[in-house]
């Protein structure tokens, strides 16, 4: 498992240019991997302190469109297999995972390589 420093990432599109903003977030999330390959397993995400409240999860493409949500395996544990809301494989590319929990937000990158 890869332990990532808690970061918040935001991409802003302005006049055809993309600006990337990164900030520290206190929400601690561990990822099993950061890429999905044709033969790869789903990526698992674990919250360090899930408490008793469910997290809200989203997966966005770089155009800011939500393509899926994470599948809840248990409280504070999620996975994503690289499919969209219709259970169809997403295109190769970079995606951003967003996890909201207890008023905090965590963002992490996932590369899909088909």
Image: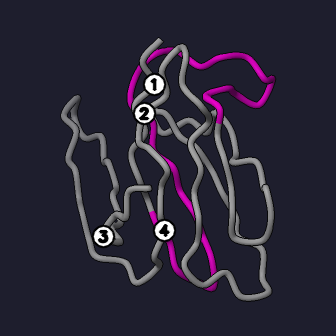
Using the image, determine if residue 33 lies above or below residue 51.
above
The Cα–Cα distance between marks 4 and 2, rounded to whole angstroms, is 16 Å
Residue located 77% across and 74% down the image = 54
* Residue at disc 1, secondary structure: strand
Q: Label 2, on which residue?
A: 35
Compared with residue 95, is residue 10 higher up or lower down, i.e. above or below? below
User: For the image shown, how many numbered marks are present on the structure?
Assistant: 4
Q: Position of residue 97 (x, y in %)?
A: 51, 49
Q: Do the residues labelled 2 and 1 touch (CB within 8 Å)?
A: yes
Task: Answer with left or right where residue 29 lies relative to residue 6.
Answer: right
Secondary element type, mark 3: loop
Residue 112, percent across and down?
45, 25
Front-lying residue, 38 or 89: 38
Q: Mark 3 Cα within 10 Å, few/some/many (few <14, many 20+)?
A: some
Task: Read off the residue under disc 1.
Answer: 112
Dot 2: what SS? strand
Which tag, 1 or 4, sits closer to the chain's start? 4
Residue 6 location (% of width, % of height): 35, 72
Q: Mark 4 highlights which residue?
A: 29
Residue count near mark 4 (Cα–Cα under 10 Å), binned few <14, some 14–19, many ≥20: many
């Amino acid at each position: 498992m890869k332990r990532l420093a808690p970061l918040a990432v935001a991409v802003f599109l302005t006049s055809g240019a993309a600006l990337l903003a990164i900030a520290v977030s206190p929400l601690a999330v561990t990822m099993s991997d950061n890429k999905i390959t044709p033969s790869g397993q789903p990526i698992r995400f674990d919250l360090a302190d899930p408490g008793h409240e469910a997290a809200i999860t989203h997966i966005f493409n770089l155009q800011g469109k939500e393509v899926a949500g994470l599948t809840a395996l248990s409280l504070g544990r999620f996975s994503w297999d690289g499919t969209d809301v219709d259970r169809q494989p997403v295109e190769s590319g970079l995606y951003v995972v967003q996890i909201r929990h207890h008023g905090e937000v965590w963002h992490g990158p996932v590369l899909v390589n088909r």
